Amino acid sequence: MISWNDYQYVLTISRAGNISSAAKQLKVNTSTVFRRLEKIETAYKLKLFERHRHGYIPTEAGQEIISAAERIEQEAFSAERALTGKDQKLTGRLRITSTESLAASFLSRHIPSFTEEYPGLYIEIISDNQRLSLTEREADIALRPTRPTEESLIGRKLSTLKWGIYGSTTHYQPYQIPDLKNLEGKSFIAWSGGPLAQQTTDWLRKNIPAVHIAYESSSMLTNAQLAINSRDLILLPCLTGQNWHGLVPVFSPLADVEGELWLVTHRDLQKNARVRALLDHLAKAAMGDRQLFQGEN
């Protein structure tokens, strides 16, 4: 009978695409993974992968094993969420994920007061623009700039997020530009990457006459630092721009650029005491940050 460890090895090889990458994920050496796969295939007289130069491709039998492994994995995640959801102790670890800009401009200001109130809780902040899975327990809570769409998740809208145009305190005064037409020909730093980044660049090209894009970066925080050290302007969420030492709002808020801020968790965790405490704390903090979200002077 195939054990869970066997399923796990086959599933990891499938996802990694090769033995060496699977070994790294499983935290064993390459020969261990190779021997385990060989042992499984010999024991069941099945070839689970076709060995190609570019990687390991599952056979039909291998795909059946992989599908079964995925079902087992999801059941394990579900059981873990159910057990965690019933845990009412205000001790232990909480993992919250967000974009790097939200982590820097919001979480960094409000997590310290939470840990002072609940010293038994250990908070891990994962500030990465790659979205982590709440379903697979990669994180307990997510702070996202978009509404959750997965049926297994629940969310609370904290605020709308206004945007503004910011520049260095060395070269600009707060709100010194009365009209977007006065920015004609100005040099901007563009944010590159996903769909939202593209929308901001498209907005610049549409609304700033003869706009000049000096350079671009995939990091909003890098862009903020670039703006501080130059005469170039930058489009930022007001929450980030208003909090960034060395930047001032040159024209803010923008009437036709806004997003949303959502606090999200899995349905199975909504009654967990640790999760509930942090959700309530951040919701309360967001109420106090209303002016920052809206870019009000």
Image (cartoon, grey):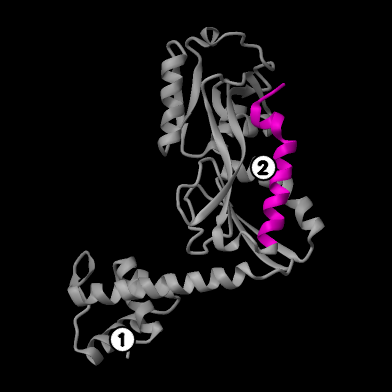
Residue 280's mark?
Answer: none
Q: Residue 223, image x and y in percent?
A: 54, 33
Q: How many numbered badges does the structure rendering display? A: 2
Residue 106's mark?
Answer: 2
Instruction: Place residue 222 in its image quadrant.
Output: top right
Q: Residue 294, image x and y in percent?
A: 65, 27
Camera sees residue 279: yes
Is disc 1 surrounded by few (<14), some (14 to 19) or many (20+) residues within 10 Å? few
Is 282 one of the magenta-colored residues? yes
Type of residue at label 2? Phe
Is disc 2 surrounded by few (<14), some (14 to 19) or many (20+) residues within 10 Å? many
The magenta region covers 274-297
Camera-side residue of 150 and 259: 150
On the image, numbered disc 1 is attached to which residue?
Answer: 35
Camera-side residue of 142 and 164: 142
- Residue 66, relative to residue 122: is it above or below? below
Give the quadrant of the N terminus.
Answer: bottom left
Q: Residue 66, image x and y in percent?
A: 30, 73
Instruction: Place residue 80 in its image quadrant.
Output: bottom right
- Residue at 23 percent across and 76 percent down: it is 62
Q: Residue 89, image x and y in percent?
A: 73, 69
Give the quadrant of the C terminus.
Answer: top right
Camera sees residue 19: no
Q: Main secondary structure of the magenta part?
A: helix
Type of residue at label 1? Arg
